[in-house]
Amino acid sequence: MSANICSCESPSFPNMNRPNCVIEQRALAFPAFMPRFKADGTRNKIDITSATIGADIQALVNAADPLERLYPMPRMENVTWERTDTVFEEAPSTRKYKVPGVGGVRTLNGELWGKNAVNQMLRELKKLGCSEVDLYYFDVAGNIWGIKDNVTDSVMRGYAVSTETFDAFKDYATDTTVPKIMVSLDFDNAECEENSYAITQEELGYNAANTIKGLFTGLMNLEELVDGTVTLTAFTGYGSANNRHDIVGLDAITPSITLALYNVTQATAMTTPTGFAATAVDGQYTFDFLTAEAALNDEIRLTITGATGYDFAPQVWSHPF
C-alpha cells in the first residue's frame, strides 16, 4: 500500500500510453531475503548499472558478511497475494470517503512441498522474523524484481517486509498428500509496489529462477588430539538422527577457502593455519597451527570463509596441551 499524496502547486495526471514491449511480472518462483541494513546502517541495494550484474547477484548469495548476503528460498507452490480491502467511510449523504492509510496491505502466502518441506528447512525459516529484511521477487520467467524508489535511480532495493508478520509452520503428510511448509508474510504497509522494476534474465546472462540457490548451514566439530594438529569434522543439519550429512570436498575449494584462527584467551590473532586436507573419513579434515601461539587451555576460535555453498559459524576449541 502507498498513500496518494496530492500536490496542489503542481498537480499531475496519468499518461497511460505504453510501448509495444514491456516487462510483465510473472508468477513468483521463490523469494530471496536480504537484511535491510548493512553493519554500517546503510541499506542493502543492488547496483543495476554494473556490467557484471549477473555475477554480482551470485556473489551476494556467497557474501562473507551475513548482513550483506542474499538468502533465496526453494521453489514455492500455491503462491497467492492477498490484499486487505480499502476502507471507506460513508456519510449520511451516501457519499463515500476513502480513509487514508487504512487497508491495502499485501500478504504473500505460499507453500514448500515434498523434499523442500523437511524439518531442517523449517528450522532455517524460523530464523526469519527477528531482523528487518527486504524481499526480492524471483519470477518463473527468470527475472528478479525489486523497487526503484525513483525512475532515475541506479540502484534497486528489495520490497520492505513487515518483520513481525513472518510465519512458517509445517503441514504434515497424510495418506493422500505430501508434507508442506506454509509460509506467509506482509509487505510493509507503506511499500510502493508501483515502483517495481525487473532485472531480466538477458541482463543477468542466466535464468535466475533456475540458477540461484541458497547456502547450506555448515556445522563443525573440532578436536586437537595431537599437539598443533586439529581434526575438523564438517556436516550439515540434514541426514538421520544417527547419520549426519557430511560435507565433503572442502579441501578442493582451496584457494578460495580461508581458515583464520584467533586466540580468545589472549585476545590475539594467530598465524594462518597450514596443511588443510581431507582425511580418509568423509567430512573430516585436518590442519596445523603454531603451538607457540597457544598455552594450555587457551580458547581458540576458528573462522571459515570462502567455502562456496556453505555458511560456517565460527567455532571454538580448548587447546589441551
Image: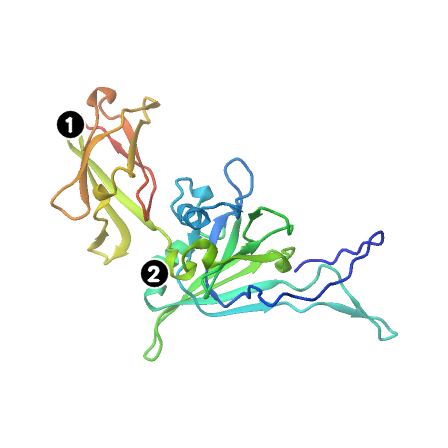
- The amino acid on which the numbered mark 2 sits, given as a three-letter code, is Asn
- Note whether residue 248 is visible: yes
Give how far across and how far down residue 193 sits, in percent.
Answer: 62, 59
- Circle 1 — which element? loop
Give the Cα distance between marks 2 and 1: 39 Å
Residue lying at the far bottom of the rendered structure: 176
Q: Is residue 318 left or right of residue 163?
A: left
- Callout 2 touching callout 1 (CB < 8 Å): no
Give, as a three-letter code, the residue at label 1: Asp
Q: Which residue is mark 2?
A: 119
Element assignment for label 2: helix
Residue 36 left/right relative to 220: right
Q: Is residue 74 above or below residue 44?
A: below
Farthest left residue?
280
Nearest the viewer among 9 and 302 is 9
**Residue 89, horizontal then vertical, whole percent:** 79, 68
Q: Position of residue 45 (x, y in %)?
A: 53, 46
Measured from the top left, where is residue 252 in percent x and y?
A: 22, 43
Most distant residue in the top direction: 292
- The residue depicted at 39 percent of the width and 56 percent of the height is 212
Give the image quarter of residue 99: bottom right
Sequence-earlier tag: 2 or 1: 2
* Residue at figure coordinates x 11%, y 45% from the top left: 280
Judged from this view, the residue extending furthest toward the front is 20
Nearest to the observer: residue 32 or residue 266: 32
Q: Which residue is mark 1?
A: 227
Does residue 160 appear anywhere in the picture? no
Q: Quadrant of the N terminus?
A: bottom right
Whether residue 259 is situated above or below residue 270 in the rendered picture: below
